[in-house]
Image: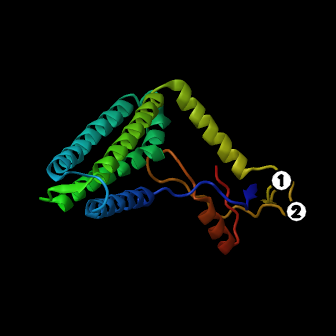
């Protein structure tokens, strides 16, 4: 059995990274919405018009984002019986939750800026300019997201993605010249006798990922050899 001792690319994936990104983007949008309207220098614009624009843009981004994400997931899920890995790859793609986080940030910025402006007669032109730039970035992210969703329901891009991920995993786990510990008939030490066999007691399932770092740590602590079949 060959056990890699170098870095292992497979890690447990949780929603913490996405949640932290969304929280960070929301805090950035809130900070910009509270700070930018307080700028007094430079060109000024009508506070009432800017306020109406921000309110419309903020609520509009939330509605449009909800509709687009619903359609994307429904389309991908509708066709997932043809290519099983596609739905998981699209759902876990960073562009999905990054776009959602940016949409939340833009909505929070618009609403916070509108509340900060309040009944002011004049407001700095920086606020509508920043809102327009953020809207353009949002449109660019949505376009990339739609193209990714379109590719996720086609056979060739899915097979290419699966192949590339599998090749990268194999190269990382079994890299030539990497540090390895070899045991077995061709190694320095023979395998110890079999003491226990652990089987999956539940119904048929799909193994998506193995936490290799934790498995290696547990096997070192127990001074044991684990064979995965």
- Residue at x 65%, y 57% (from the top left corner): 8
In the rendered image, the quadrant that contains the N terminus is bottom right
Which is more foreground, mark 2 or mark 1? Answer: 1
Q: Is residue 157 above or below residue 139?
A: above
Q: Residue at x 14, y 56 (%)?
A: 121
Q: How is the image coloured?
A: rainbow
Label 2 Cα crowd, 10 Å radius (few <14 / some 14-19 / many 20+)? few
Q: Earlier in the sequence, mark 2 or mark 1?
A: 1
Which of the labelled discs sits on residue 188, or is there none? Answer: 2
Q: Element under label 2? A: loop
Q: Is residue 187 left or right of residue 164?
A: right
How many neighbours does mark 1 have within 10 angstroms: few (below 14), some (14-19), or many (20 or more)? few
Judged from the image, the secondary structure of the residue bearing numbered disc 1 is loop
The label number, if any, that marks residue 155 in the structure image: none
Q: Position of residue 95 (x, y in %)?
A: 45, 44
Towards the viewer: 62 or 168? 62
Question: Label 2 vs label 1: CA separation?
Answer: 18 Å
State left or right for residue 11 relative to residue 34. Answer: right
Write down the residue under mark 1. 177
Q: Quick one: 226 or 11, which is closer to the camera? A: 11
Displayed quadrant of residue 31: bottom left
Percent of width and height locating residue 108: 27, 55
Q: Return the x and y of residue 25 as percentages of the image width and height.
A: 37, 57
Using the rendered image of the protein, determine whether residue 148 is visible from the camera's viewpoint.
Answer: yes
Determine whether 194 is above or below 171 in the image.
below
Tell me: residue 111, above or below residue 84.
below
Instruction: State the image quarter where residue 24 is shown.
Output: bottom left
Residue at the image position 73 percent from the left and 58 percent from the top: 3
On the question of residue 104 being in view, the answer is no
Q: Where does the image place residue 150, in percent across and percent down from the top left?
A: 43, 28
* For residue 46, side relative to residue 106 (left or right): left
Q: Residue furthest front?
A: 42
């Amino acid at each position: 059995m060959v056990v890699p001792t170098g870095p292992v690319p497979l890690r447990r994936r949780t929603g913490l990274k996405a949640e932290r990104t969304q929280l960070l983007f929301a805090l950035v949008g809130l900070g910009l919405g509270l700070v930018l309207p307080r700028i007094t220098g430079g060109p000024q614009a009508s506070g009432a018009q800017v306020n109406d624009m921000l309110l419309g843009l903020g609520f509009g981004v939330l509605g449009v984002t909800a509709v687009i994400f619903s359609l994307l997931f429904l389309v991908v899920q509708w066709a997932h019986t043809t290519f099983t890995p596609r739905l998981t790859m699209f759902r876990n793609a960073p562009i999905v939750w990054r776009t959602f986080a940016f949409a939340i940030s833009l909505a929070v910025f618009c609403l916070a800026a509108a509340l900060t402006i309040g009944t002011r007669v004049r407001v700095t032109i920086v606020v509508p300019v920043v809102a327009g730039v953020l809207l353009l970035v949002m449109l660019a992210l949505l376009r990339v997201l739609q193209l990714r969703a379109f590719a996720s329901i086609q056979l060739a891009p899915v097979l290419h993605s699966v192949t590339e991920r599998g090749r990268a995993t194999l190269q990382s786990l079994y890299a030539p010249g990497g540090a390895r510990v070899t045991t077995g008939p061709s190694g320095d030490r023979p395998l110890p006798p079999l003491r226990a066999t652990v089987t999956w007691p539940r119904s048929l399932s799909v193994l998506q990922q193995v936490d290799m770092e934790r498995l290696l740590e547990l096997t070192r602590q127990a001074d044991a050899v684990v064979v995965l079949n």
